[in-house]
Image: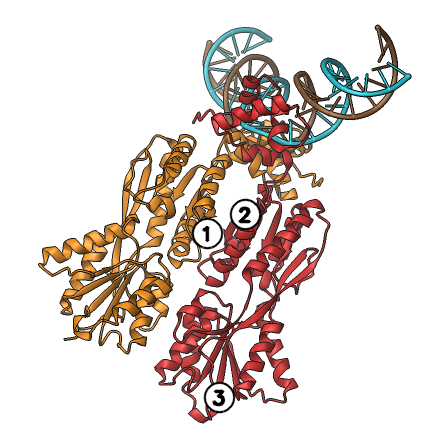
Chain colours: A red, B orange, C cyan, D brown
DNA sequence: GCCTGTTTTGAAACCAGTTTCAAGTCTCTT
DNA sequence: AAGAGACTTGAAACTGGTTTCAAAACAGGC
């Protein structure tokens, strides 16, 4: 496969300078006499020369790239976040390499293993093992090893790794949501979805529970319904079970731990003959396009993804300067009111 | 940043062999005496050594990576397809690098420009310029240049580039859909969404129109409604306009050119007081998780994404062997019947 | 024990850049 | 016109692997 590419050596020969000088011109890394610079730039134009990023990566030890490991891009939460990250990265001249674990820990480990060998500047670990409150020993070891080579940013904050953290802070969003729901007269809530060993789920539950306690509202047995996964169908199944209970014992507002769960609950409500929001109010998390497109549109707590991306790039730049840099930052979540919540049914 | 990594030189020294031998052991690329092989493997284990992929990429001229350029991962069509591709790639020991154009031609061009410098084995071009029936001259030039360096696989077939093609063949799916709708008594159709300069849209329109003609069914003025983009809201706006027409002049079945458009139409129908599928039947394309989660769930023509991934990898392997290899392959689409279509309303 | 043929092996070149270092070239004083 | 100081420059080493080539080691046959 001899795609004999043009190299800086070719340019150097043709311009009558050394490869070092070409490199300096391309990187603006040192003063080069104007006439030589012009001659080189002319050839760059002429051949539409783009330096080989792999060779650059090898010699500079970084690929101007950030690696993002997440559980599943098909989940709109992750794809939306990914786009926020990529937008910010591109405008800082960085590339993103997406590693999709396909919801499979083995693939996640494989990515963790492989990405270390790719001279990525920084890793961002989202979801999967990063969210696990009790990660497997194997995961911890792997991350330990990765951290030795490449600075890591975690999107969760519960573990003790020596790394930066960039978290979404649901608290303000949840407070706004609860205040809004209280204002609508709701006093009986159910929280549907997820497993409490997943850090973001745990923290949401915790925050909500704290707010209820502060307001002396009852937290009945069974007001939290776990689901094995975070898909629409999980919400649907949970909702179906919930709505079998006698009408009077039903909560007036249901919070899905995630957009897809909330959508599932909504569907179950409909099927049970309950109107949303007249008979039951439903809210969720994430605030991606899904919340806009469902009927009724979903009132939602969610992060500003573009701000997440920007903050991330700030952190990345500091880490590139100094791999020992450590910071824990938060991107606040807000409330977006749509149509899925209404006055509490009596 | 002196992360003095372990290299094959270190292993070689410690094992008392040459770097060449270590390389041979790691790649199984030649016979190495058993005792030396064992000694090397022992050290590989001991240090959990993973060869530097960038250096490997530089010296072998390929990164065992396929580059996928698409318009927007937030679109479930693309994220689902991406997952199909990644699954297949991983099980062939390849990596995928995702380039999301964020629906912006400039970013698309930038990716096209950059990816060429990354020693990617093969490019897959999906959406954006690849789908444009009248691509800009700039795009053509850029692609020409890319093709010279890296084999390209197009997901559309209308242009004349010297490249492989791996297309989704809607025809069987559309035929099944139309037969199904005819069986339900439908004779008046509307097709909503998209621009006819987008290749897949054009071809769907063409196929449907051909089938209608074959069945001597009328194709009234305005039975095709274009939309500027392919989002839910475009479908919604188009639907809103459509449903303002007197009830009797309405089509009994509406086909959204895309899942999101179909969802938008569904919402408009609901808002106009039309029940789906009792008053109007709605079908769509793509068949991602969205079709399952909407209410009513959407009857849909769609491709088998895992098969697309597998075929892609077959093609990639042939192209890696021989960059001059050319093939045009098709992955058939099928029909998935759900609940959004019913007996034609009289 | 020597010759031949096959395996193993290491030195060195290569991939395409960056960077250090010392030498070469200017410009400005005096 | 020489010397000092500031700019420019190219040679060479370096990033971490792979691969070619020829030499070294080994096995088998005589």
Circle 1 chain: B
Q: Is residue B189 above or below residue A180?
A: above
Res B36 quadrant in image: top right
Front residue of B251/B214: it is: B251
Residue extending farthest to the left is: B216
Q: Residue at x 51, y 37 (%)?
A: B118
Residue D18 is situated, as x and y percent measured from the top left of the image, at 52, 29
Badge 3: few (under 14), some or many (20 or more) residues near its Cα, within 10 Å? many
Q: Residue at x 47, y 36 (%)?
A: B116
Element on which disc 2 rests: helix
Q: What residue sits right under mark 3 in the picture?
A: A344
Residue B148 is situated, as x and y percent measured from the top left of the image, at 40, 30
Residue B102: which numbered mark, if any? 1
**Spatial distance from mark 1 to mark 2, Cα to Cα?**
11 Å
Res A246 quadrant in image: bottom left
**Spatial distance from mark 3 to mark 1, Cα to Cα?**
41 Å
Q: What residue sits right under mark 2 in the picture?
A: A90
Mark 3 vs 2, N-terminal side = 2
Badge 2: few (under 14), some or many (20 or more) residues near its Cα, within 10 Å? some
């Amino acid at each position: 496969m001899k795609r004999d590419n043009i190299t800086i050596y070719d340019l150097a020969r043709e311009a009558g300078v050394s490869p070092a000088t070409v490199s300096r011109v391309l990187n603006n890394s040192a003063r080069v006499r104007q006439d030589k610079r012009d001659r080189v730039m002319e050839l760059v134009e002429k051949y539409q020369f783009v330096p080989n990023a792999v060779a650059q990566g090898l010699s500079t030890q970084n690929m101007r790239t950030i690696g993002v490991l997440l559980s599943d891009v098909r989940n709109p939460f992750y794809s939306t976040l990914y786009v926020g990250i990529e937008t910010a990265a591109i405008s800082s001249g960085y590339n993103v390499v997406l590693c999709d674990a396909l919801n499979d820990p083995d693939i996640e480990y494989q990515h963790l293993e492989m990405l270390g060998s790719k001279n990525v500047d920084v890793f961002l670990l989202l979801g999967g093992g990063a969210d696990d409150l009790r990660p497997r020993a194997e995961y911890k070891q792997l991350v330990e090893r990765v951290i030795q080579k490449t600075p890591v940013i975690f999107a969760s904050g519960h573990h003790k790794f020596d790394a930066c953290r960039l978290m979404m802070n649901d608290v303000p969003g949840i407070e706004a949501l609860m205040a809004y729901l209280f204002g609508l007269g709701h006093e009986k809530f159910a929280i549907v979805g997820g497993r409490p060993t997943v850090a973001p789920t745990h923290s949401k539950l915790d925050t909500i529970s704290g707010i209820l306690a502060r307001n002396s509202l009852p937290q009945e047995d069974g007001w939290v319904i776990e689901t094995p996964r975070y898909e629409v169908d999980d919400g649907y199944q949970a909702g179906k079970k919930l709505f079998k209970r006698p009408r009077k014992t039903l909560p007036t507002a249901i919070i899905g731990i995630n957009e897809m769960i909330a959508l599932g609950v909504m569907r179950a409500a409909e099927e049970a003959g309950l109107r949303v929001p007249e008979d039951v109010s439903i809210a969720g998390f994430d605030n991606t396009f899904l919340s806009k497109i469902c009927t009724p549109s979903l009132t939602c707590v969610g992060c500003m993804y573009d701000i997440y991306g920007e903050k991330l790039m700030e952190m990345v730049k500091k880490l590139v300067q100094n791999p020992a840099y450590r910071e824990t930052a938060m991107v606040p979540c807000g409330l977006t009111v749509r149509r899925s919540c209404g006055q509490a049914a009596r």
